[in-house]
Image: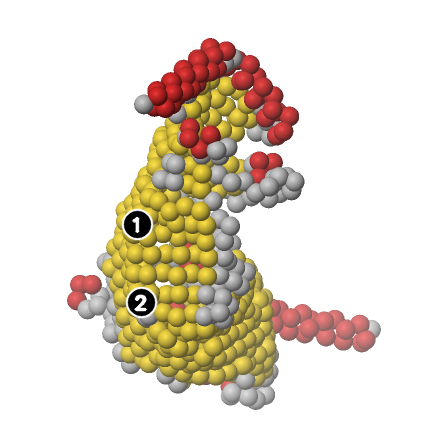
Amino acid sequence: MKAVKIVAFVLGGLVVLLAAVAAYILATFDANKWKGEIAQLVQDKKNRSLKIEGDLSLSLFPSIAVQLGKATLSEHKSEQVFASVDTARISLQLMPLLSKQVVVDTVALDGVKARLVRFKDGRLNIDDLLSKDEKEPPARFDIAGVKFANGELAWRDEKAGQELVLSALNLTTGRLANTATDKFDLSATLVGRKPHVAVALKAGGEYRYDLDRKSYGGTKLSVRLTGDVADMKSLDLTLAAAALQLTGANEIAVEQLQLMAKGKEAGDAFEAKLEAPKLALAADKASGAAVNAALKLAGAQRNVDAKIALSGVEGSSQALKAGKLTLELDARQGETTIKGSLTSALAANLEKQTLELPAFSGELVVANPQMPMKSVKLPLTGGLRADIDGQTAALHADTRFDESRIAAKANVSRFSPLALGFDLDIDKLNVDKYLPPKAAAAGGAAAGKPAPEKPLDFSALKGLNASGVVKIGQLQVSNVKASNVRLEVKAANGKLDVAPLTANLYDGSLAGALSVNANNNHVALKQNLANVNINPLMKDALDKDVLEGRGNVALDVTTAGTSVAAMKKGLGGTASMNLRDGAIKGINLAKTFRETKAIFTTRKDAVQQAKQTEKTDFSELTASFRIANGVARNDDLSMKSPFIRLGGAGDINIGEDRMDYVAKASVVNTSGGQGGQELDHLKGLTVPVRVSGPFDKLAYNIEFGGLVAEAAKAKVEEKVKEKVQEKSKDVLKGLFRK
């Protein structure tokens, strides 16, 4: 009993002593002194200014705690605020202190704000805080829990132009230490640009980690994100996992992972789902059950249903392999449907972030009711390799499209924005075969009224960054036929350049360039046709049989507009042709002149419609054109034939599909050729021929009225000349007689 009293006396004395010590510490604690010394320490160590504006207080019971009022911390070597806090409280467990251990009971922060910046040179504004003193031992800590309320964390990347702000941040955790397992709960709002982000975030579950072993994971994890991300609106994304573990840089283990997302993109609703029942990737071994993913997209103009399955996972994280990867696609765009499947083995390296499909095979079936064959099947074979970290990829593929054999190679030098290089080789391609038929002219009251034009849309070029070569052995487009076609293509900044563009066509060759600018719907075309047979070319390209011959044609034009009609009316530039050994079809000038002797005497003009059975031969035909506002002006037409010389001037209105042209024919030789002997009465005279009307109904008007006047004038002059000569003879005779 006496011993009990002694113990009680000692304990009571100890309590009194501790109470006295605590009372003394609290009574002598100088907050202002500590505030100044702490601020000076931060300035000396980190070259940052710490300002403690609120109260600094100390409490000893029920735990030792330090409470801090409003405070700010500046940027490195600057007075600009880097971080601030409204209140902070840190409490230490008392009993571990008696054994010389520091265990933080609770860290409670309210109203913390911080601003992280990555400068254009790659430095961070917290590099000085992250630097470590090699002499210091690794930090050891043990915190019973953290409460983080009303926080805000801002991120700005000056190099990428990206800004993100995590606000309304509330975080509650259990124990935090170098090795710990406990629960957490997180909620926040994230907004930003590049990409545009405005979402609410919630997460919870149990975490487990070991900092020394670099092992991180958790169980019963759940994450939900709702809002807008980039072009995705009303996004609702959930991620759940029964267990997830990351060890080192390349070891992953996951159980019952499920990712689901739904929302709207460009007005279309989408749903995505990923399931991985069990997957383990280690440095020396990999295994897993089937991984399945699905994507659905539904909209007014398009529908997509895609499924991916991965099975037979083996190997290691260094050399992960899957025995089979399958892809199934069922899509619709307007009236076009695409169904396809693809299978391949898969090889991946998580550390190097590479992915390879060494040999894939499959097929695509494309169908459209407007296509003549309704549907076409494309078998696919090839290979793919991608470097995710380096943002590069290489693809080679072979297919057969109807009667065309196609070999393609593509190289991606950047994923975002996409930068693509390609090489496309096609043995033969008839584009017309796959275009919808031209609409028949409407009958009844609507006959004669052209259908409204669809506006030209080059907007697809604005997001395209690609360059490459296209080679086609035999090509038909708009009924024009060519061979050995080669196009060097470059697309960037909304502009497409095809230069050079070369081909063989109609017994001659073509060389030129094409430029299309989607920013202003501007088109520029340069083409030089050498030694081309002009008649079949005009028949195929324009469905016009008006000219024969062989020679050169040069075209250098530009235009702009939102429709074909507007572009025709805005056409400007130059053109020229130089043909030989040909004919102008629709009129036989020799025959016409022979048949118009009566008209010649009556001084009446002769108007006749063009006849394809008639033609005027020539040995040489040259002309040049100046084009402005869709009208081509010519003033130097020159045609030579055995008995006729033809010149002329006039306008060809491309925008209105009309022409008004006056050709002047002169009979220079009546000795032969196309009945030239019968044209003696026209020798030396110029016969005007006016060609006018719409292209599909040209009329030739031989203006004999002016010709008769010219002939009459010539006759009068001839008679006067004869009389003068007779008088001269008489005068001379009289002189000689004298």
Quadrant where the C terminus sits is bottom right
- Name the residue rendered at 69%, 73% in the picture: 725
**Label 1 sits on residue:** 222
Q: Position of residue 631 (x, y in %)?
A: 47, 59
Tell me where residue 106 sits by quadrant.
top left
Q: Is residue 186 above or below residue 638?
A: above
Furthest residue in direction top, as rendered: 27
How crowded is the residue under tag 1: few (<14 C-alpha within 10 Å), some, or many (20+)?
some
Name the foreground residue: 371 vs 640: 371
Q: Is residue 295 above or below residue 179?
A: below
Q: Is residue 341 above or below residue 449?
A: below
Name the foreground residue: 489 vs 728: 489
**Label 2 sits on residue:** 292
Q: Position of residue 667 (x, y in %)?
A: 56, 78
Furthest residue in direction front, as rendered: 2
Q: Position of residue 454 (x, y in %)?
A: 32, 59
Which structural element holds mark 2? strand
Quadrant where the N terminus sits is top left
- Name the residue rendered at 65%, 40% in the picture: 135
Which structural element holds mark 1? strand
The answer to which of marks 2 and 1 sits earlier in the sequence is 1
Q: Position of residue 536 (x, y in %)?
A: 46, 82
| Residue type at the position of mark 2 | Asn
